Image (cartoon, grey):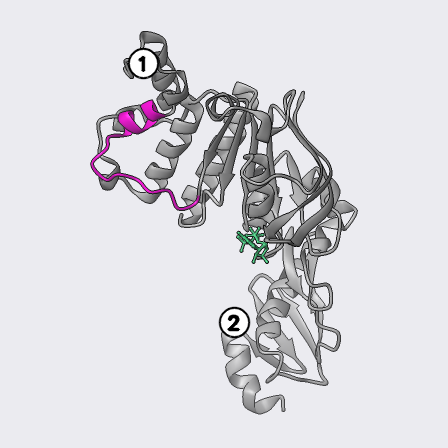
Amino acid sequence: MDQVLTGKNLSLGYEKGQDRKVILSDLNFQLYSGQLTCLLGPNGVGKSTLIKAILGRIRPFEGEIKLLDKSPVDYPREKLSKKLSVVLSEPIIPAQMTVEQLVGLGRTPYLKWSGTLSELDRNYVDEALAATKMDFLRKERLGELSDGQRQKAMIARALAQDGKVIILDEPTSHLDLVNRHEIMFLLQDIAKNQDKAILVVTHDLDIAIETAHQLWLMNCGSPLIAGLPEDLILNAQINELLPKDRFFFDPKRGKVNLRSEDSGWEIQGSEDLVFWLEKALKKRKSTFRTEERIHVLENPFRIQVGDRIYHSIAEFFEVSQTSLR
Ligand SMILES: Nc1ncnc2c1ncn2[C@@H]1O[C@H](COP(=O)(O)OP(=O)(O)OP(=O)(O)O)[C@@H](O)[C@H]1O
């Protein structure tokens, strides 16, 4: 497992005339080949700014980024494209272009003056189509693909480019649940099987935890936290992503949960049943209160309060609106 991209003591931001607007400071990171890394953080924290610096589009105010042996800003453009490929979140895609033509564009940095693909280039295109399971759609026009298929075509283009590092900015943001998982598992496979270092910017914590080998967590004013998702959950650093007064990450459920200090109810029963009933109750926290203890029972599912029995949460809410107050 090699470090292919590193950042040391970085300070990043934008310059306007004499003014410097520092967005990120004291930033350190290592991106490893063979791993899928997900970068998470709230809107505006500076994720895109970091990506721009990695792509050499902005120069660090301080510190250094190293892509293999040198800084991205020191690579000639074409050489950089052979080391690093990018899939942006809102690419401009010509609808008439076929999948095969798009993936062929990934070979642009390698083309000779004639501009035509050599046999070797075509092999890369074929391999990229096979790795993304897009072979059967190679002649399809991009305008006629589903969003998920289009995203896979973009990933195939990045693969054909054959860089060591692939960066994707919110690649799953427009996709349904199944496609989001599929794309992320595909990226996980590519990282492992093709020894790529893949960095994905995402807001999807659930899927990042499920699929990433490493997480990078960014939050305003704190250093970047990097680690295995499971370590960050067990040592509670995952909470750095959340406003701690209102939310916490529940390690048992693997989910973000709302804090409730004074819940206004007491529930007894098995952990799973209590969890789901409490979830439903939290959504009604402003309207629901009871002094009586709530028992939640299974086989068959029922909720008991005093001697009253309810057979679903909906029924409990409906009746308790009047009887429990
Ligand atoms: N070209 C620019 N010039 C000046 N400030 C900028 C520029 N681009 C971004 N910023 C500022 O940098 C900060 C971080 O923005 P950035 O886009 O990096 O955040 P982000 O974490 O990617 O957010 P999101 O999750 O919403 O995409 C914001 O305050 C933004 O206004």
Residue pictured at 38% horizontal, 34% vertical: 154
* Residue designated by label 2: 312
In which quadrant of the rendered view does residue 61 lie?
Answer: top right
Q: In the image, is 144 to the left or to the right of 45?
A: left
CA neighbours of label 1 inside 10 A, class few (<14), some (14 to 19), many (20+): few
Q: Outermost residue, front direction?
A: 18
Under mark 2, the amino acid is: Ser
Q: Start and end of the magenta stretch?
A: 89-105
In the image: residue 74, left or right of residue 28: left
Left or right: 84 as drawn, with respect to 62: left
Residue closest to the far right: 235
**Residue at 62% in and 73% down:** 282
Which numbered circle lies on residue 158?
A: none
Name the side, left or right, on which 118 lies relative to 267: left
Residue 67 percent location from the top left of the image: 62, 26
Q: Residue at x 45, y 49 (%)?
A: 173
In the image, is residue 320 part of the stretch drawn in magenta?
Answer: no
Q: Nearer the viewer, mark 1 or mark 2?
A: 1
Q: Position of residue 243 (x, y in %)?
A: 69, 63
Q: Is mark 2 within 8 Å of ligand 1?
A: no
**Disc 2 element:** loop
Give percent across and percent down for residue 192. Answer: 56, 23
Find residue 113 and name its label.
Answer: 1
In this view, 238 is above or below 125: below
Does dot 1 land on a helix, a strand or a loop? loop
The C terminus: image quadrant: bottom right
In percent of width and height, residue 31 lies at 65, 30
Q: Nearer the viewer, residue 17 or 7?
A: 17
